[in-house]
Amino acid sequence: MTATLDQTIREIVASDFRTAAVFQRHGLDFCCNGCRTLEQGCREAGADPGAVLRDLDVVLAAPSAGVPDFASWNAQELVDYIVDTHHGYVRGALPVLLKHTRKIAEVHGQHHPELRHIARLVARVADEMHDHMAKEERVLFPYIAALASAGGEAPPAPFGSVQNPIRMMEAEHQFLGDAITEIRQLTGGYAVPDDACTTYRVCLQELEAFEADLHTHVHLENNVLFPKATALEGARS
């Protein structure tokens, strides 16, 4: 495969997840705004299209052994992986992040007032993700699983088309992505200040790891699972 500027970022990263590292490096949003063409994404991010294409070509030309081919997975496999891997990670990481961001805001907030805002943002992210994952696990994902196993017509849905809850989930993904981007900006890209204590340093590492997981998490839903669910519904109608 060779990437082109008129392809969407979603198409490129869905076909080979290794390209996500290229988009990350050049500051292109591949998860929440993957519907943009590569040309649009480069323009909005101020990235050099030629440099991005060259980096993509290097990745795409290399053997892909050991990298999951998420695009080939069926809907049920994706749902199980997302819940077990990413929802599980979020439920384990957020209590620690809440504790650490509150602590460093209290201890270092006088000299780093941005930490108080970061603690509030993390609290909002935690509340949003708790509700968001519950809606997915109790409503949307079971319906997608039913779609995948249906032999004939689509099963009845209380929300009309599956596209309705998908649009809601994508809007919530956008909020989460914006909040994490703001945290990255407030921390100067998770840069460690000279007066940072051990907890401060660890917390910045935790925030960066949370961002990386969120990007993969949202990518798998927006760019892989949700298009599969929409296609399944179309095939069953």
Image: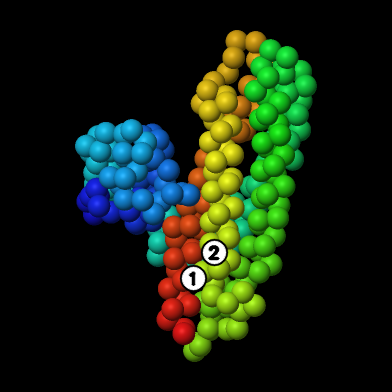
- Residue 3's disc is none
The quarter of the picture where residue 139 lies is bottom right
Label 1 is placed on what type of residue? Ala
State whether residue 54 is above or below residue 189: below
Q: Nearer the viewer, mark 1 or mark 2?
A: 2
Q: Position of residue 222 (x, y in %)?
A: 48, 57
Say if residue 195 shows up in the picture. Answer: yes
- The mark found on residue 166 in the picture is 2
User: Pointers 1 and 2 in contact (CB under 8 A)?
Assistant: yes
Residue to which mark 1 is pinned: 229
User: Could you tell me how far apart the alpha carbons at marks 1 and 2 are, in whole angstroms?
Assistant: 9 Å
In this rendering, does residue 76 appear at all?
no
Residue found at the very far top of the displayed protein: 194
The colour scheme applied to this rendered structure is rainbow
Q: Is residue 217 left or right of residue 64?
A: right
Q: Nearer the viewer, residue 158 or 191?
A: 158
Q: Using residue 1 as the reference point, say whether residue 84 is left or right of it.
A: right
Q: Which quadrant of the view contains residue 14?
A: bottom left
Residue sitting at x 64%, y 47%: 89
Q: Residue at x 44, y 57 (%)?
A: 223
| Amino acid type of the residue that numbered disc 2 sits on in the rendered structure | Ile
Q: Position of residue 6 (x, y in %)?
A: 25, 52
Residue at x 71% of width, y 34% of height: 120
Residues packed near mark 2 inside 10 Å, few (<14), some (14 to 19) or many (20 plus): many
Label 1: state its secondary structure. helix
Q: On the rendered image, what quadrant is the N terminus found in?
A: bottom left
Task: Report the front residue among 200 and 65.
Answer: 200
Q: Earlier in the sequence, mark 1 or mark 2?
A: 2
